[in-house]
Amino acid sequence: MELTLDRETGPLTARIAAAIDRRIDTGALATGEKLPSVRRLATRLGVSPFTVVAAYDRLVAEGRIVARAKSGFFVAPRATGRGANLSLDPLPSRRIGINPIWMMRQSLTAGPGQPKPGCGWLPPDWLPDSAIRTALRAIVREDGRNPALGNLVEYGVPLGFRPLRDLLARRLNELEIPAEPDRLLLTDSASQAIDLVCRYLVSPGDGVLVDDPGYFNFHAAVRAQRGKCIPVPMTPTGPDLDALDRLATAQRPKLYLTNAGPQNPTGARLGLNAAHKLLSLAQRHDFRILEDDIFRDFETQPGFRLAALDGLARVIHLGSFSKTLSAATRIGFLAADPATMADLADLKLAISFGNNELSARVIHRLLSDGSYRKHVAGMRDRLARCRHHVLKRLTGLGLMPWMDGAREPAEGLFLWMALPSNKSALAVAEAAQSAGIILAPGNVFSPGEESRWDSFLRFNVAQSIDPQTHATLKTVLGHAGARLHKL
């Protein structure tokens, strides 16, 4: 096999792998053809056998060659559509229709540059990629040098990376939440934290109060434990507490899942008097509250938290950095009373045993060196500018914010908008999907089969600034209005 490295750039291992890869692409190496032995190719190229092994290992990992015991390395069968998008078909099945799983699958399998105003996260260019890379390099350099920080090859302690818990306790104390490092549990994501709480508190048949509309992952976590979602109607000033009282009296729920700060998807906020009434209802009806605060840093001045008013007696507080830092750097955390925390830590050990130490150390560094504070300040400023622009465009198309101007959230990631003339959000989302735009229809945020929110859409402000989104909505709402109304 003739191999020329002159055309390649980068480290030697990568150059050798790229040269072989190019010969496979051009057909110079056919499917099933045996590659030179490691020693033979190393001698021919004048490199170490370890370098050739590393190059071959890279090609094996990429599926370009296969290793056969005691035989050597061979060119792998050519994959159909190499380089194409091999993800699941993003079109919704007619059996399930448009639902939360459909929307998540759509958003996660969207092609580069495809507008997705219905998704729940920031665009990649809004996130601090360079700061994360800098933190990773620093962690690699310091690994093993500071015993207090541990290393990157051990499981870690059950509650999670202690320096990060110390720092998180101070952050929660700023909100007057009486958190201590030993009353904090790190998880691999906010989703894992929600799952842990539901596993801990919910048995088959138990009722769980959820906001309607509300975060759809709450519904999935309850159903995974064979619990029953009890929808609590939302109002512009928070949950309808009179309705919650009646529901709790009739169905004796174990848990209430809700958001802190601006609610997802509506942006509604709970007033202080209503918060005290909610805590009183929790005590009277003997249910716990999971307060999801993953959007804390989208607020310039975070308001009160139920966990602060309650002192972590009935409230379990949840946080995460997936929305503000990186969806790939998965860390969530829970704060609770000592007895609950001990049980949750044991449950986590039984389920996953270890901790995401690398992500915990990355986040600890970014929180410690000031990078995170600088990032979120810029993010909030940018979001505020986009919010005005997006809201103006949407209202220009006839969509109206759910809350009046005085209460329209000035902060947060989402806008909850009503379609004109009671058009079906499902039909609008299907038409937009055909045009390459991913929307979030209101019914996916409701746990009921029939939703009163079918004329609403949730818009992610940061993901809605693409002109293509506005043009597609204008076409769908204008030229296809009559058809959509009938669907």
Image (cartoon, rainbow, N blue to C red):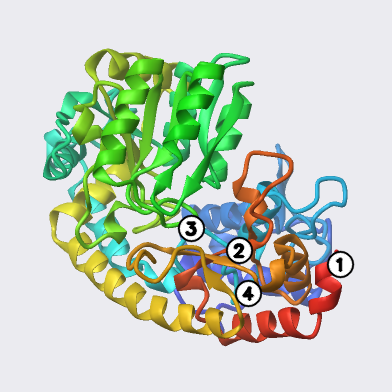
Instruction: Say which residue appears at 87% left-offset and 46% top-offset.
Output: 95
Helix, strand or loop at disc 3?
helix
Q: Closer to the camera, 27 or 161?
A: 161
Q: Is residue 213 left or right of residue 313?
A: right
Q: Tell me the distance, in whole angstroms, between the alpha carbons under discs 4 and 1.
A: 28 Å
How far from the left and from the top, in percent, is residue 135? 25, 58
Helix, strand or loop at disc 2?
strand
Give the residue type at disc 3: Thr
Q: Closer to the camera, 173 or 375?
A: 173
Q: Tell me the distance, in whole angstroms, between the alpha carbons under discs 3 and 2.
A: 54 Å
- The residue where tag 4 is placed is 114
Q: Tell me the distance, in whole angstroms, between the alpha carbons under discs 1 and 3.
A: 65 Å
Looking at marks 3 and 2 on the same chain, the residue that comes earlier in the sequence is marked by 3
Q: Tell me the distance, in whole angstroms, between the alpha carbons under discs 4 and 3.
A: 39 Å
Tag nearer the camera, 2 or 1: 1
Q: Are marks 4 and 2 in contact (CB under 8 Å)?
A: no
Q: Is residue 41 visible?
A: yes
Tag nearer the camera, 1 or 3: 1
Give the residue type at disc 1: Lys
- The residue where tag 2 is placed is 457
Looking at marks 4 and 2 on the same chain, the residue that comes earlier in the sequence is marked by 4
Give the residue type at disc 2: Leu
How far from the left and from the top, in percent, is residue 266? 47, 56
Residue 352's place in the image compared with 321, above or below, is: above
Looking at marks 4 and 1 on the same chain, the residue that comes earlier in the sequence is marked by 4
Q: Closer to the camera, 479 or 438?
A: 479
- The residue where tag 3 is placed is 51
How far from the left and from the top, in percent, is residue 85? 73, 65
Q: Residues within 10 Å of mark 2 (few under 14, many from 20)?
A: many
Looking at marks 2 and 1 on the same chain, the residue that comes earlier in the sequence is marked by 2
> Dividing the image into 4 quarters, which one contains the C terminus?
bottom right
Helix, strand or loop at disc 1?
helix
